[in-house]
Image: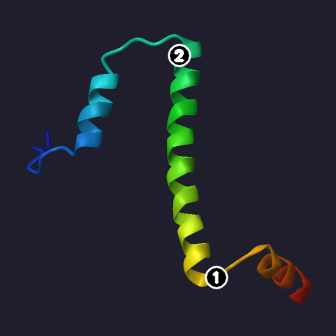
């Protein structure tokens, strides 16, 4: 078996802790929803930052759509 030389990240440690629970289907669905929401919120913040940095607006999108 391959030995792991680097320490686990905090996310990996939390994930391993989660693996010790036996969740029902509804709980698994809720957990997947929470993870998806967390990742979506992080992505939306990044997108908002890029749009603000570049000065994009709804008008920018309309121009893009009309250019095609």
Q: Determine which residue is flagged by label 2.
A: 27
Sequence-earlier tag: 2 or 1? 2
State which mark lies toward you, 2 or 1.
1
- Image spot of residue 61 (x, y percent): 80, 77
Q: Quadrant of the N terminus?
A: top left
Q: In which quarter of the image is the C terminus?
A: bottom right
* Residue at point 79%, 73% (across, down): 58
- In the picture, measured across the screen, residue 62 lies left or right of residue 24, that is right
Depth check: give the residue in front, 22 or 40. 40
Depth check: give the residue in front, 1 or 66. 66
What label sits on residue 55 in the rendered view?
1
Dividing the picture into quarters, in which one does residue 57 lie?
A: bottom right
- In the picture, measured across the screen, residue 43 lies left or right of residue 9, that is right
Q: How crowded is mark 1: few (under 14 residues within 10 Å), some or many (20 or more)?
A: few
From this view, report whether residue 21 is shown above or below residue 59: above
* Residue at point 86%, 78% (across, down): 62
- Image spot of residue 54 (x, y percent): 60, 83
From this view, report whether residue 10 is shown above or below residue 19: below
Q: Disc 2 and disc 1: Cα gap in Å?
A: 41 Å
* Element assignment for label 2: helix
């Amino acid at each position: 078996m391959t030995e792991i030389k680097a320490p686990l990240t905090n996310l990996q440690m939390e994930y391993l802790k989660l693996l010790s629970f036996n969740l029902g289907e509804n709980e698994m669905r809720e957990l997947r929803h929470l993870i998806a929401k967390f990742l979506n919120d992080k992505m939306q913040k990044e997108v908002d930052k890029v749009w603000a940095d570049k000065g994009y607006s709804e008008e920018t999108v309309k121009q893009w759509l009309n250019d095609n």
